[in-house]
Image: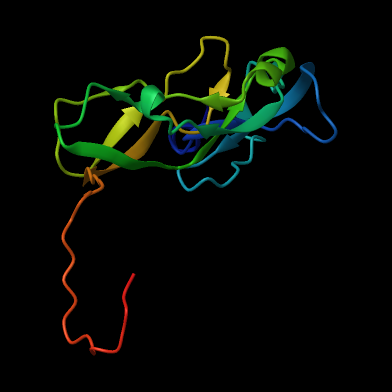
């Protein structure tokens, strides 16, 4: 691009627009180059000399799918909670992530898993940021990290007592208890 110094120096970026209406597969198109100033406003090109006024674009279009992030204990945690404690629940934010890729890959996915969080005998709840274990063939993932909250509670136990002596207080003489 060449032209008056003040005009060339006012250039901040170039923008190309491709119409995606009705597109469901990859395509090629030619689009005009629009020059912009630092405020994002178009600049008149009548006083500029340009080597090209348009570009050829190859646009890959992939289907998308919304997938839940697994909160199964075996998928999320690597290690054990402290003795006498249990994992009460695991939640994930966001709960779902949008991915894009070849349809056959998307069809094979039921959920996404994270890179497991290593734990070493925690005895209280915690929240950690975790990376989603991405698949190499995914073309897009809306969030590569999620926040995992693990609720840890003290284990409760129950049991039976047999042969316990029961004493009744305030029983009237005319009553029979069985």
Residue drawn at the location 56% of the way across and 27% of the way down: 111
Question: Residue placed farthest to the front in the image?
Answer: 174
Instruction: Give x and y (percent) for residue 39.
Output: 48, 48
Viewer-nearest residue: 117 or 94: 117
Q: Position of residue 42 (x, y in %)?
A: 60, 43
* Residue 21, quarter of the rendered image: top right
Looking at the rendered structure, the number of numbered marks drawn on it comes to 0
**Residue at the far top in the pictured view:** 136
Q: How is the image coloured?
A: rainbow
Whether 126 is drawn above or below 65: the answer is below
The picture places residue 154, in percent across and down from the top left corner, at 19, 45
Against 5, residue 153 (above or below) is below
Residue at x 69% of width, y 15% of height: 102
Percent position of residue 67, x then y: 58, 32
Q: Which residue is drawn at 20% across and 51% down?
A: 163
Viewer-closest of 65 and 168: 168
Nearer the observer, 65 or 8: 65
Taking the image as shown, residue 125 lies to the left or right of residue 132, namely left
């Amino acid at each position: 691009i060449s032209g008056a110094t003040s005009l060339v120096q006012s250039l901040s970026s170039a923008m190309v627009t491709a119409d995606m209406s009705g597109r469901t597969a990859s395509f090629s198109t030619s689009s005009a180059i629009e020059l912009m100033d630092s405020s994002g406003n178009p600049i008149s090109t009548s006083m500029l000399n340009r080597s090209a006024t348009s570009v050829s674009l190859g646009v890959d279009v992939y289907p998308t799918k919304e997938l839940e992030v697994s909160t199964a204990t075996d998928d999320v945690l690597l290690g054990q909670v402290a003795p006498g404690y249990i994992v009460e629940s695991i939640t994930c934010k966001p709960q779902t992530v949008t991915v894009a890729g070849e349809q056959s890959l998307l069809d094979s996915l039921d959920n996404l898993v994270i890179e497991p969080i290593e734990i070493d005998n925690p005895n209280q709840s915690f929240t950690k940021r975790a990376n989603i274990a991405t698949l190499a063939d995914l073309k897009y993932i809306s969030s590569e990290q999620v926040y995992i909250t693990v609720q840890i509670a003290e284990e409760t136990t129950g049991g039976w007592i047999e042969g316990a002596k029961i004493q009744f207080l305030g029983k009237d003489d005319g009553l029979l208890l069985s």
